[in-house]
Image: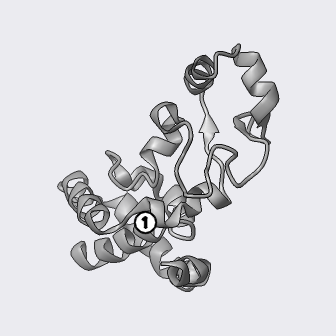
Amino acid sequence: MQDMINNLPKFAKDKHNENKKFFDKLKKKPPKNLDYVMQELHDDEFKQTDCLECANCCKTTGPLFTDKDVERIAKHFRMKPQQFISQYLRIDEDKDYVLQSVPCVFLGSDNYCSIYEVRPKACSEFPHTDRKKFQQISNLTLKNVAICPAAFNIVEAMKQKIK
C-alpha cells in the first residue's frame, strides 16, 4: 500500500490528460446509468480498500468545515464554536474554514480519527466517488486521484466500464 501511496502523484500526473479528456466527454453526455455504475464501482473498490492502511487524505489535505461541522465538533469537545475555530481552523483563500495545518490534528498514529463519529461532512463523503451526478465533480475527482488510491482505482475501472 505504501508503494502505491508514494507513486500515486506520478501515476495521477501520467493519467491526467487521459482522465481530463474522459471527464470532459462525460460532462457533455453522461450515461443515463452513471450514478448506478459509480455506486457499483465505489462499493467494489471499498470491499478491498482499507482506509486505515492509508489515511493519505488525512495526512496530505484538509477538509472544508461547514458551519454545521464546526457546531457539531465544538459541541463534541464541549467548546463554543468560536473557540474551536480559533484553536483548530483558519479561513482559506476561498473564505472557507480549513485546518490550520496538515496532517490532520485529529489523526492518530494508528490512522484512526479521534473525531470519527462527528467528523466533517467532507471527510465522511471522501473521495466522493459515490456521489450523485458524479460528472459534476470531475475537477475534484482529478485532484482526488492523486491523493486517494481508491479514487485512482475507481476512475481506472470507470474508464474501462464506460467507453
Q: Is residue 31 above or below residue 3?
A: above
Secondary structure under the numbered disc 1 in the rendered image: helix
Q: Residues within 10 Å of mark 1 (few under 14, many from 20)?
A: many
The one nearer the camera, 98 or 2, is 2
| Residue lying farthest to the front in this orientation | 110
Q: Quadrant of residue 51?
A: bottom left
Relative to residue 101, is residue 67 drawn left or right? left
Residue ID at (46%, 75%): 19
Q: Is residue 26 above or below residue 121?
A: below
Relative to residue 104, is residue 127 drawn left or right? left
Instruction: Report the label total.
Output: 1
The one nearer the camera, 15 or 112, is 112
Residue ID at (20%, 59%): 40
Q: Quadrant of residue 93?
A: top right
Question: x%, y% of residue 100?
Answer: 79, 42
Which color scheme did the rendering employ for the protein? one colour
Placement of the C terminus among the 4 image quadrants: bottom left
Residue ID at (30%, 66%): 45
The one nearer the camera, 64 or 34, is 64
Question: x%, y% of residue 58?
Answer: 60, 54
Q: Is residue 89 visible?
A: no
Q: Is residue 14 visible?
A: yes
Tag 1: residue type?
Answer: Ala
Question: x%, y% of residue 97?
Answer: 71, 34
* Residue indicated by mark 1: 151
Question: x%, y% of residue 75?
Answer: 59, 17
Q: Is residue 15 above or below residue 128?
A: below
